[in-house]
Amino acid sequence: MRELPVETVQDYPRPPRLEQVPQRLLVRLGGAVVADTTRGLRVLETHHAPTYYIPREDVAARLTPVAGGSFCEWKGRARYFDVTSGGTSARRAAWSYDAPSPAFADIAGTLAFYAGRMEACFVGDARVIPQPGDFYGGWVTSNLRGRIKGAPGTEGW
């Protein structure tokens, strides 16, 4: 498997860009596969770790909708799910956009997962580290350079 190219998060665009992911995406919870795809998408935004989206058809876990949601100025309104797999449940561990803005229409019918609430997430062979903080759901891989938003003191920039 080829290595991920070096990327600097300050070089990511604003407004964000949506692109296809050439690597396999794999998510595990409770010793079981939650999601496995070669059809993933990612959103790149300045100072953020990429957020990966997986087609619902490639998700094997049980998803339970939960109350509440959030709003992204670029993508629209998100809703959240508890994720159950391998006898383990993770609260508010995934989200989706049912009717995203036109620029992000391709993520309708996909799910993103908080890496910190899963057992393990991978981009190709690279194991993911959760984006700092408790709000953003980007996946940090060892190829990323620069200061990633999310840690205390970085939320406002």
Image: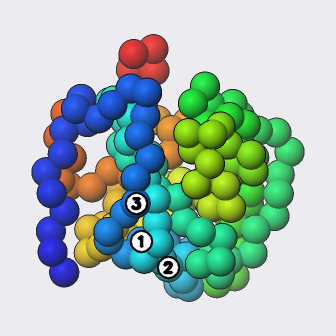
Res. 3 image quadrant: bottom left
Q: Left or right: 32 with respect to 108?
A: left
Nearer to me, 38 or 135:
38
Q: How many marks?
A: 3
Asked if labels 2 and 1 touch by Cβ distance under 8 angstroms, the answer is yes
Residue 14 locus on image (x, y percent)? 38, 26
The CA span between labels 3 and 2 is 15 Å
Give the x, y percent position of residue 149. Answer: 37, 29
Q: Tell me the tag on residue 144.
A: none
Q: Residue at x 58, y 54 (%)?
A: 106
Report the amino acid beneath label 3. Gln
Amino acid type, label 1: Leu
Please name the residue that numbered disc 2 is placed on.
36
| Label at residue 20 | 3
Query: Alpha-carbon neighbours of circle 1 within 10 Å: few (<14), some, or many (≥20)?
Result: many
- The residue beneath circle 1 is 25
Q: Is 9 situated above or below 24?
A: above
- Give the answer, above or below, for where 115 lies relative to 30: above
Q: Relative to residue 110, is residue 41 drawn left or right?
A: left
Find the distance from the CA under tag 1 to the CA under tag 2.
Answer: 6 Å
